[in-house]
Image (spheres, rainbow, N blue to C red):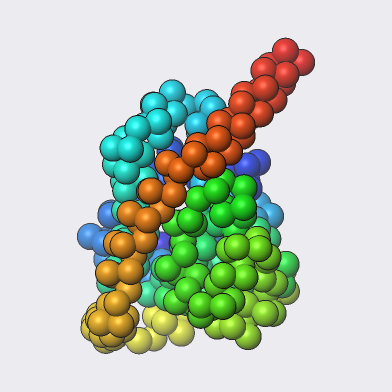
């Protein structure tokens, strides 16, 4: 069994370049390992607040890439798409362990897990469309999980979904008190380990085959291009400029105070 933890609790596990690069490496290594199952967790009080917008203010390479069409495309393909593809196609069962905030890009990670255990305080949301003027890169997952109308409600109005509603909608498999989260994850693992690895691997292949025949792979590929285009509209460019300028101002003030 392999336990993978997003470990930036001070930033609510916001996914910066370093975290996503390491996650991709670990998932690639897991594919070649004898592990029987994988748990994806977040340290601290939240699973993840999504992609870290601060990268555009503190990481010169990241900033340079998002300023060109080709740079953003390659960067987001490698950082955002690749780990999701690896997680979704692992031959072993994957369990998402979710507490607190599960926002924006974190929805893609959870949506790529086979099973999800959520704490009572888990909340699922995205403000990307409203705050960044971009079509959320996680739109296909939200659509598959929620259906068209509920997906539009969540993304367009930036509404959130609590743990119990997520259970009712089928986003998660179990909701437990926060103190029982690890115990429930372990009990699910124990049951999975009773099943022959080959049976699970072949079953997972069939589930993915059926999902792709319904069009998931094509939808994901199309929407990634739509997402890229949305970042380069005049409104999105201006919203990002303002957010980065505000982040840079806060960083200067914090540096001066120190």
Residue at image location 48% in from the left, 56% down from the top? 135
In the image, residue 60 above or below residue 111: above
Residue at image location 50% in from the left, 31% down from the top? 56
Q: Point out residue 151 in the picture as x, y percentages from the top left corner.
A: 55, 72
Answer whether residue 95 is visible to the viewer in this image: no
Tell me the quarter of the image containing the N terminus.
bottom left
Q: Point out residue 224 in the picture as x, y percentages from the top left corner.
A: 35, 56
Residue at image location 58% in from the left, 63% down from the top? 155
Seen from the viewer's position, the closer of residues 29 and 121 is: 121
Seen from the viewer's position, the closer of residues 226 and 90 is: 226
* 189 left or right, relative to 243: left
Answer whether residue 73 is visible to the viewer in this image: yes
Q: Point out residue 21 in the picture as x, y percentages from the top left corner.
A: 37, 43
Q: Quadrant of residue 37?
A: bottom left
Q: Point out residue 133 in the picture as x, y percentages from the top left corner.
A: 55, 48
In the image, residue 216 above or below residue 48: below
Tell me the quarter of the image containing the C terminus.
top right
* 44 left or right, relative to 189: right
In the image, residue 85 above or below residue 24: below
């Amino acid at each position: 069994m392999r336990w993978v933890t997003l470990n930036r609790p001070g930033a609510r596990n916001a996914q910066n370049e370093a975290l996503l690069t390491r996650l991709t490496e670990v998932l690639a290594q897991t594919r070649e390992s004898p592990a029987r199952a994988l748990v994806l967790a977040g340290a601290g009080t939240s699973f993840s607040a999504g992609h870290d917008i601060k990268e555009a203010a503190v990481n010169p390479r990241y900033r340079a890439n998002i300023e060109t069409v080709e740079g953003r495309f390659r960067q987001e393909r490698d950082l955002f798409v690749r780990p999701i593809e690896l997680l979704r196609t692992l031959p072993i069962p994957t369990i998402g362990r979710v507490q607190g905030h599960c926002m924006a890009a974190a929805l893609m990670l959870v949506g790529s897990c086979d099973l999800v255990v959520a704490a009572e305080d888990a909340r699922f949301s995205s403000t990307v469309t409203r705050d960044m003027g971009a079509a959320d890169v996680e739109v296909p997952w939200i659509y598959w999980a929620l259906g068209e109308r509920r997906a539009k409600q969540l993304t367009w109005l930036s509404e959130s979904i609590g743990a119990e509603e997520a259970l009712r909608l089928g986003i998660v498999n179990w909701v437990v008190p926060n103190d029982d989260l690890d115990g429930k994850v372990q009990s699910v693992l124990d049951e999975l380990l009773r099943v022959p690895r080959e049976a699970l691997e072949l079953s997972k292949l069939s589930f993915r085959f059926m999902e792709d025949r319904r069009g998931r792979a094509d939808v994901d590929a199309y929407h990634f291009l739509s997402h890229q285009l949305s970042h380069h509209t005049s409104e999105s460019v201006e919203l990002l400029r303002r957010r980065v300028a505000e982040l840079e101002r806060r960083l200067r003030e914090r540096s001066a105070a120190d």
